[in-house]
Amino acid sequence: MSTDYLEVRGLRAAYGNIQVLHGIDFTVSKGQIAVILGANGAGKTTTLRALCAMVTVEGSIRLAGEELAGQRTADIVRRGVAHVPQGRGTFPELSVEENLLAGGFVRTDGQVRADIERFYGTFPVLGERRSQAAGSLSGGEQQMLAIARALMLRPSLLLLDEPSLGLAPMVTRALFDQLSIINAEMGTTMLVVEQNAGLALGVADQAYVLESGEVALSGPAHELAADDNVRRAYLGY
């Protein structure tokens, strides 16, 4: 029996007649951080969208042994999959606290308020701006809010699409440090699409490189970080 928490086999995805993913395979073990690297147009974002049933897919997507392919997006969310898309995806007119409450809307465990206070501790700037409209936050603050809102679901799997996009290097480093802490403290399995390969490989356990909708390289993150081909193509040395 497989010990992989997320197991994807033969995944194909298309937008209409345009095929983007061509039968990719990858796995993520429970509690791991896995990263997907690749050039623009390689299929990274489509991979995350495919896991959430946001594009037409073929193949198998199993989470903790349960098949997700063919399920509706809403049902996948209820199964514990949270997605932070490119562009953050916060509700700009709502306050920080209202965004967090929206993230925990489907929960019935009575711990929503406690988790809001927890994430104010994780991201103190959100606590300071709890009554402020999300759209008035800086890019880095909006990204923190988007991640905290996704975590309000208490997901078993967190999907992050380019979390460093548009952020200053110092903010990006602080954000990835927090992701590592959240992973360690909450045990949240994470699948991260990221252009900043050096930073992503530094926090990840497993890595996959996509090229033209196919997995070109895969392995432990530290091994790919030492791979000459990966270094030249993505790390710049």
Image (cartoon, rainbow, N blue to C red):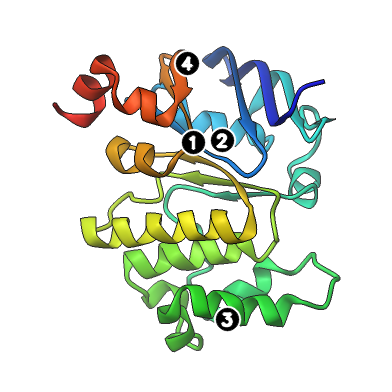
x and y percentages locating residue 123 in the rendered image: 45, 74
- Secondary structure, mark 3, is helix
For marks 4 and 2, the one nearer the N-term is: 2
Does residue 139 appear left or right of residue 191 in this picture? left
Q: Which residue is painted at 55% across and 54% down in the image? A: 183
Query: Which residue does the numbered mark 2 point to in the structure image?
Result: 48
Does 57 sit left or right of 84 as displayed?
Answer: right
Q: Amino acid at mark 3?
A: Glu
Secondary element at image label 4: loop
Of the residues tagged 3 and 1, which is closer to the observer? 1
Write down the residue under mark 4.
213
Q: From mark 4 to mark 2, how far is it between C-alphas?
A: 13 Å
Vertical placement of residue 208 versus 64, above or below: above
Q: Nearer the viewer, mark 1 or mark 4?
A: 1
Mark 4 touches mark 3? (CB < 8 Å): no
**Is the residue marked by circle 3 packed among few (<14), some (14-19), or many (20+) residues within 10 Å?**
many
Tell me which label, 4 or 3, sits earlier in the chain: 3
Place residue 57 in its image quadrant. top right
Q: Which residue is mark 1?
A: 205
Which residue type does callout 1 highlight? Asp
Is tag 2's residue or tag 1's residue first in the polypeptide sequence? Answer: 2
In the image, what residue occupies the spot 44% across and 61% down?
Answer: 178
Mark 4 vs mark 3, CA separation in Å: 38 Å
Horizontal side of 115 relative to 137 (left or right) equals right
Residue 166 point in image, percent of width and height: 28, 53
Q: Can residue 94 be seen here?
A: no
Left or right, 36 with respect to 115, comes to: left
Residue 97: numbered disc: 3
